[in-house]
Amino acid sequence: MKNTVFPLLFAALALSGCAAIQTTPPTAVHQPMSVRPAEQPRAVAANGAIYQPGMGRTLFEDRRARQVGDTLTINLVERTSAQKSANSNATRGSSLTGSLGASANTPFAGLDGWKAQAGVDSEFTGSGAAAANNVFTGTITVTVIDVLPNGNLLVSGEKMLAINQGNEFIRFSGVVNAHHVTSTNTVQSIQVADARIEYRGSGFIDESNTMGWLHRFFAAVLPF
């Protein structure tokens, strides 16, 4: 028995050590979070004319994101608020009364005048309330990773901040209507469809707020 316990314990410690080494938390945003733009045609020698066939953009075209590999700035202006409350009451009651009468010549003569009474009362009262308020503001620059057939842009990006001994990750992805992109190449996050916004951290401070795997195991096996 001892020969099997120690290898299992060593394997569990090794797995927990591997989990601690991982510094980049998983993500649910659209992948990839960056993409290499398509190769543009080689520029031809200038011939003195205003129009150049090798130019990737036209003369009067603005610099808004519209192609794979272009960057776009997202203004995070998320604000959500939800509140819910419920109350319920239930009451029920019942009663029963009976008596028994018997003549003197019957076997139940001794039960003459016996009375019985029974009653049941039940009552239930329940109430619950929940409230949530979330505010997320800031900016993040993302990359166009795909252009849909209708012209919408699928964007995705990540920003990492190294603060003291921990890392903070801000990730964003979603579908942007090209008409919502302003002349400054920005768009509001509330105008992005299928938006996925993440704010996660890594490091010993974040790990100290996370339940360990052994604690989670016993919490699942012994929920009480």
Image: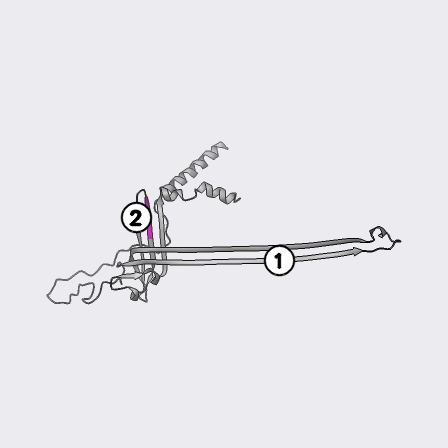
41 or 112, which lies in front? 112
219 or 69, which lies in front? 219
Which x, y percent locates residue 58? 20, 66
Which x, y percent locates residue 59? 18, 66
Amino acid type indicated by mark 1: Thr
Q: Is residue 144 visible?
A: no
What residue span does the magenta drawing correspond to? 166-170
Outermost residue on the left side: it is 48
Q: Is mark 2 on a helix, strand or loop?
A: strand
Task: Give the number of callouts.
Answer: 2
Secondary structure that dominates the magenta span: strand
- Name the disc covering residue 161, or none: 2
Residue on which disc 1 sits: 91
Q: Residue at x 53, y 55 (%)?
A: 127
Amino acid type indicated by mark 2: Leu
Marks 2,1: beta carbons within 8 A = no
| Quarter occupied by residue 185 | bottom left
| Residue density around tag 1, few if under 14, some if 14–19, many if 20 or more, within 10 Å | few
| Residue density around tag 2, few if under 14, some if 14–19, many if 20 or more, within 10 Å | few
Q: Which residue is drawn at 38% across and 43% down?
A: 207
Give yes or no for residue 205 being in the magenta stretch. Answer: no
Q: Can residue 139 be seen in this view?
A: yes
| Left or right of residue 92, residue 81 in this image | left
**Residue 13 vertical placement versus 195 (above, below):** above
Q: Is mark 1 on a helix, strand or loop?
A: strand
Q: Residue at x 30, y 48 (%)?
A: 161
Give yes or no for residue 167 being in the magenta stretch. Answer: yes
